[in-house]
Image: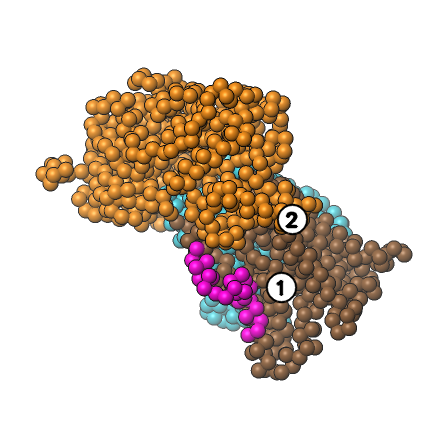
Chain colours: A cyan, B brown, C orange
């Protein structure tokens, strides 16, 4: 096999996510009354970026063969926090942004500590921490409100040079500054190794615990970035339970669509970003095809159901039935 | 693993007989209930009145029915996150069936439960035969159920109000002074205890929760057991929804949202291992009462929703750290 | 050994008085080992002689209970495999330690990947991987290939390359050639000889006698967790080595076997040309009622797969299974245990496959026979209790009560529960997968009596054991498997330790090499 075929094999999941997204987006644009204008692109980007951040966060945890059901609540909590502190002069605003990101990291780190050192099952541990994070969000914003530094918000949700949606640029920056370094670091490799086969990783002397902890913590950071952007779009903070659990749910769907294995060890956050945009476009598609918006949740549910069933094709290859039970 | 169970036995043999047989987690949960009642009685003596306690049991019975279902699934080592919208589906379908001609009121309750069981079967099929992680399948089912209900109601709360039979079941009295909802809960509890202790299905559930390999190699059709367990969970979720609709006299969007976390918490607080295979039904009853009391006292004390969420989360984490840890790696 | 001798040799690595227990089972007892630089040191021993435990302790995977290890004369302890690797000990494990989803290069450099500015330098990593693969003689493997896409033999080569890449001073190879093709084995041998000349110490564990004869400078034989002999290679014949591996430490009392003529009954269980991928090849056998047939051979030659295949666990088997002369499709354990075949399988690992440890003795005992004591899914507690009492008495299970968790019982009694749980169904065909591993001698003898009694009342018994004494003492016939095939059938007086070990190693009784491989 030549070099590029190996590359293709490595990136298969990500490319599949990209293909799904491009296909859906092309259909969407082709049927959009205005076509692909800078405006349409900006709106699509801004809506998709929120999903993308949360999906990236979920990817980091899923790679370690875990799951983070509190990711949507961290997103909501940081949104509420940002609506208090990302305000005023440039300096306080900057400090506020840093504090919001730190808060997200602390939430992620707490999840990591409970799962790794507390040896709790990720599912239940993160359901419980999710309740705590949502409670804190409600404490901050019992009613929707607050504000944000509007100059910053407009700059990050507008367009660069009149064409490029600046939210996409911010997303790319997150990929370059958080995801790629993580993936290329020893800890990132440890997270992959632990997710793929914890026993083999242990035998190989990989720093399993630190790798997993880094994954959970960075997941909190990425969710907080999403929370910041939510504040920039809405100018307010709101502790909406349905929104938080919705983002958690769709982050899992995006991860699956983006070719990340729920059993750990395989996939890329870039794929999950495409998965998030694809999931986002599902909603928009129904709009351009003039489907009654009432049908939207059902169709999305069916798409999700199909997406998660695809993985079970691998079952056909199992030859020893005892392998079902591992 | 065998070391810890040996230790536990040696401690237990020194206890009096009736305590020796009980699960320490169940005793802890009942102890917490007494402690809560005692502390709240210092705040106001009303907390110990028969009326208040019966009222709490009535409220607890909705959660109790849902928790009974989810416990079957948790004992298997799985989880059912489709509770919120399956509950809502059960409630809405029962209300809808009631207005369906002459037979309507008769079939209302069974029809609601049947819809729940159907969603449960969908979950069970995904988990047992497609071997998709239960968390994912049940999340997806939750969305599908929500989607169906949104289409059905047109996005608004449904027009049908709860039929009299449903209302009677939730709020009426067969025995004066004792609300029917409590009777329903007692009846379901009796069935569950029978199921867990006297049937081969119950034994299989515990067996699969402990080691699905061993159960399979013993000749148990583990996939069928898993599927039935999810169907039971779906049916009881829906039944909980029906009762709730009777209590509030109508079905509403998102009425089940507030039940998923407390139901899981009640099961776990009652000493059932989230990894499956261990736990007693009595513990779940204790967990349900504990959660309901906690909720009620926090709201009487005017603790805001935010505080309640935080208290839940923290209580669950602490209890999990006490009971629910996986064994260390080496 | 005198002080003068110790100073004279001054080994690179020394292990003294090392012991390790798993629960009540003694895996290694007062083991001693000297490893010298520039030598290939072969470790020999039967299944369960303690070789794997020895390696795991050296590689930091498990910690020893007693004893000490010296490297360059300094005492060392390893808290983790990483610590052992840092000290220069690399291990090629029998169960592969590769991470399936990562690429070959990622795996080779996993312990300490090259870094630039804190990030993994992929170009440098690739260079390392290519060099290591070349040293191992596996240039055909592409460094970017994902490990899970490689066949087993290639993975084993990657494993060797990975061990070489860490530039070890001591290299341990545990059955490292078991999955390799003949061509690969030649390459690996050349590599090992070169490493020896470069001054590495190599520890080579293998069951293949001819490999040891070709490679080793020194041999150490292990038996029952102790090192029983060390000698220079080539000073003992294969036959003598086999005798050392067998030893004469204990003998068990076995019940008398019936005369051969008395059991010429029709076959109850037969299989014809049974195959399963490359793990089982063309297996034909028959077991008559009243007969105890043993499965012999080295561990992992397909014996477990054969039992699982008969019990309906494996998918995609070829060939046919006949019960009482009639073909029967057994698609699951549920079908296997049903009344027509009435099979029972005593599984390999009682802790995860035979029992539910936290559940009570009562619940475990009746778990496989609930359909016998229930009506309409409702358990008849009286019937259940009677059957359980009968079994507890029959097998003399020692327990503090029926309602204690089965995990609290001793290993021997746990195993009795596993067997009793199946006897409750009155099986007509009993498959046993190494049922006496890790249990005490007394219980073992009770089990032998039980096997014979079962056969006497008409059951057909297929019995896999890693303990050759048991096969000799219990079985009317023994089928020896090698590489998924039946290579030899021994009957009556021909079942001897020498014959068993020789055919297990697939060599003839002399020193000539066998045909397979």
> Does residue B262 appear left or right of residue C9 in this picture?
right
Q: For residue C380, which numbered disc appears in the image? A: 2
Q: In the rendered structure, does residue B7 fall within the stretch colored magenta? A: yes
Front: mark 2 or 1: 2
Q: Residue C189: give x, y in percent of width and height.
A: 30, 25
Note whether residue C491 is visible: yes
- Nearest the viewer among A140 and C395 is C395
Q: Is residue B183 magenta?
A: no
Instruction: From this view, report whether residue C127 is shown above or below residue B20.
Output: above
Looking at the rendered image, the quarter that the N terminus of chain C falls into is top left
Q: Residues within 10 Å of mark 2 (few under 14, many from 20)?
A: some
The total number of labels drawn is 2
> Which label number is shown at residue B285?
1
Helix, strand or loop: magenta stretch: helix
Left or right, C106 with reference to C87:
right
Say yes or no: labels 2 and 1 on the same chain: no
Residue A237, label in figure: none
Q: Is residue A102 visible?
A: no
Q: Classify mark 2: helix, strand or loop.
A: loop
Q: Position of residue C467 (x, y in %)?
A: 38, 32
- Residue at 52 percent across and 20 percent down: it is C264
The residue closer to the viewer here, B105 or C226, is: C226
> Where does the magenta region start and end?
B6-35
């Amino acid at each position: 096999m030549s070099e590029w075929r190996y590359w293709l094999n490595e990136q298969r999941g990500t490319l599949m996510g990209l293909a799904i997204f491009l296909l859906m987006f092309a259909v969407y644009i082709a049927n959009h009354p205005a076509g692909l204008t800078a405006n349409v692109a900006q709106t699509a980007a801004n809506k998709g970026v929120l999903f993308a951040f949360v999906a990236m966060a979920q990817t980091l945890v899923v790679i370690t063969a875990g799951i983070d059901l509190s990711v949507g609540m961290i997103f909501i909590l940081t949104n509420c926090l940002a609506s208090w502190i990302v305000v005023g002069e440039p300096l306080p605003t900057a400090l506020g942004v840093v504090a919001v990101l730190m808060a997200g990291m602390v939430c992620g780190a707490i999840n990591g500590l409970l799962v790794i050192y507390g040896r709790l099952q990720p599912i239940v541990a993160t359901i419980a921490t999710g309740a705590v994070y949502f409670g804190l969000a409600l404490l901050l914003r019992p009613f929707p409100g607050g504000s944000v530094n509007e100059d910053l918000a407009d700059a990050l949700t507008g367009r660069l040079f009149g064409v490029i949606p600046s939210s996409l640029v911010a997303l790319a920056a997150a990929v370059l500054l958080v995801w790629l370094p993580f993936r290329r670091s020893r800890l990132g490799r440890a997270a992959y190794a632990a997710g793929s086969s914890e026993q083999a990783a242990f035998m190989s002397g990989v720093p399993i615990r630190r790798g997993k902890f880094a994954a959970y913590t960075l997941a909190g950071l990425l969710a907080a970035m999403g929370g910041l952007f939510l504040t920039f779009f809405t100018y307010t903070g709101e502790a909406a339970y349905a929104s938080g659990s919705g983002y958690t749910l769709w982050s899992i769907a995006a991860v699956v669509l983006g070719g990340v294995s729920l059993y750990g060890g395989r996939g890329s956050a870039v794929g999950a970003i495409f998965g998030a945009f694809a999931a986002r476009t599902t909603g928009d598609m129904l709009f351009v095809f003039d489907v009654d918006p009432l049908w939207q949740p059902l169709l999305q549910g069916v798409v999700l159901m199909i997406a998660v069933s695809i993985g079970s094709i691998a079952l056909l290859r199992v030859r020893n039935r005892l392998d079902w039970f591992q | 693993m065998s070391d810890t169970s040996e230790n536990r036995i040696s401690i237990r043999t020194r206890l009096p007989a009736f305590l020796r047989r009980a699960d320490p987690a169940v005793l802890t949960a009942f102890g917490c209930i007494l402690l809560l009642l005692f502390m709240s009685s210092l705040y106001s003596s009303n907390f110990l009145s028969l009326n208040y306690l019966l009222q709490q049991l009535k409220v607890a019975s909705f959660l109790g029915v849902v928790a009974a279902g989810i416990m079957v699934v948790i004992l298997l080592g799985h989880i059912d996150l489709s509770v919120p919208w399956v509950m809502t589906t059960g409630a809405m379908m029962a209300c809808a069936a009631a207005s369906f001609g002459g037979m309507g009121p008769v079939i209302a309750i069974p029809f609601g439960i049947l819809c729940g069981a159907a969603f449960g079967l969908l979950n069970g099929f995904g988990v047992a035969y497609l071997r998709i992680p239960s968390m994912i399948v049940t999340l997806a089912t939750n969305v599908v159920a929500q989607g169906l209900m949104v289409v059905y109601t047109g996005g608004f709360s449904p027009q049908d109000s709860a039929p009299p039979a449903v209302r009677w079941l939730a709020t009426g009295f067969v025995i004066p002074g004792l609300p029917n909802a409590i009777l329903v809960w007692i009846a379901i509890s009796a069935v569950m205890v029978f199921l867990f202790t006297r049937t081969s299905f119950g034994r299989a559930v515990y067996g699969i929760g402990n080691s699905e390999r061993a159960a399979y190699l013993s000749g148990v059709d583990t996939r069928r057991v898993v599927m039935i367990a999810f169907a039971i969970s779906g049916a009881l979720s829906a039944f909980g929804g029906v009762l709730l609709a009777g209590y509030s006299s109508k079905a509403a969007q998102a009425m089940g949202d507030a039940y998923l976390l407390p139901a899981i918490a009640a099961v776990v607080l009652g000493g059932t291992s989230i990894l499956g295979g261990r736990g007693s039904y009595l513990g779940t009853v204790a967990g349900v009462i504990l959660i309901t009391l906690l909720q009620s006292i926090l709201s009487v004390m005017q603790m805001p929703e935010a505080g309640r969420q935080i208290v839940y989360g923290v209580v669950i984490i602490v209890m999990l750290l006490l009971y629910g840890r996986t064994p260390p790696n080496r | 050994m005198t002080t003068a001798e110790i100073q004279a040799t001054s080994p690179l690595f020394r292990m003294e008085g090392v012991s390790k227990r798993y629960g009540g089972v003694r895996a290694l007892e007062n083991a001693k080992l000297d490893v010298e630089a520039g030598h290939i040191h072969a470790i020999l021993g039967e299944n369960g002689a303690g070789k794997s435990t020895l390696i795991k302790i050296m590689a930091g995977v498990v910690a020893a209970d007693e004893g000490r290890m010296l490297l360059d004369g300094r005492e060392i302890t390893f808290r983790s495999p990483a610590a052992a690797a840092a000290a220069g000990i690399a291990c090629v494990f029998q169960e592969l330690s590769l991470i399936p989803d990562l690429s070959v290069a990622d795996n080779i450099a996993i312990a300490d990947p090259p870094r630039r500015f804190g990030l993994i330098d992929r170009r440098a990593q690739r260079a390392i991987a290519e060099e290591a693969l070349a040293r191992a003689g596996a240039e055909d493997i592409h460094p970017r290939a994902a490990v899970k896409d490689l066949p087993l033999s290639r993975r084993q080569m990657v494993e060797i390359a990975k061990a070489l890449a860490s530039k070890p001073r001591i290299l341990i190879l545990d059955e490292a050639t078991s999955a390799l093709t003949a061509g690969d084995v030649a390459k690996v041998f050349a590599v090992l000889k070169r490493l020896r000349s470069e001054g590495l110490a190599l520890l080579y564990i293998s069951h293949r006698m001819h490999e040891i004869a070709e490679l080793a400078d020194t041999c150490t034989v292990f038996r029952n967790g102790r090192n029983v002999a060390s000698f220079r290679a080539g000073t003992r014949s294969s036959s003598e080595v086999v005798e050392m591996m067998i030893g004469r430490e204990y003998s068990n009392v076995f019940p008398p076997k019936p005369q051969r003529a008395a059991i010429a009954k029709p076959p109850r269980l037969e299989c014809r040309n049974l195959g399963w991928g490359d793990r089982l090849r063309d297996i034909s056998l028959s077991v008559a009622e009243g007969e105890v047939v043993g499965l012999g051979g080295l561990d992992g030659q397909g014996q477990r797969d054969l039992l699982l295949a008969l019990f309906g666990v494996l998918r995609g088997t070829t060939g046919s299974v006949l019960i009482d002369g009639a073909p029967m499709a057994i698609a699951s354990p549920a079908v296997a245990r049903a009344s027509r075949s009435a099979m029972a399988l005593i599984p390999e690992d009682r802790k995860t496959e035979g029992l539910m440890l936290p559940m009570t003795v009562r619940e475990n005992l009746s778990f496989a026979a609930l359909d016998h004591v229930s009506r309409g899914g409702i358990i008849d507690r009286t019937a259940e209790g009677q059957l359980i009492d009968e079994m507890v008495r029959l097998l003399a299970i020692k327990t503090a009560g029926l309602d204690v968790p089965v995990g609290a019982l001793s290993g021997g009694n746990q195993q009795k529960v596993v067997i009793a749980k199946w006897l409750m169904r009155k099986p007509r065909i009993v498959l046993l997968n190494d049922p006496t591993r890790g249990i005490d001698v007394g219980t073992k003898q009770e089990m032998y009596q039980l096997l014979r009694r079962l056969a006497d009342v008409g059951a057909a018994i297929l019995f896999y054991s890693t303990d050759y004494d048991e096969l000799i003492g219990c079985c009317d016939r023994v089928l020896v498997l090698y590489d998924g095939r039946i290579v030899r059938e021994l009957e009556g007086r021909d079942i001897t330790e020498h014959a068993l070990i020789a055919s297990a190693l697939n060599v003839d009784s002399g020193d000539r090499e066998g045909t397979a491989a």
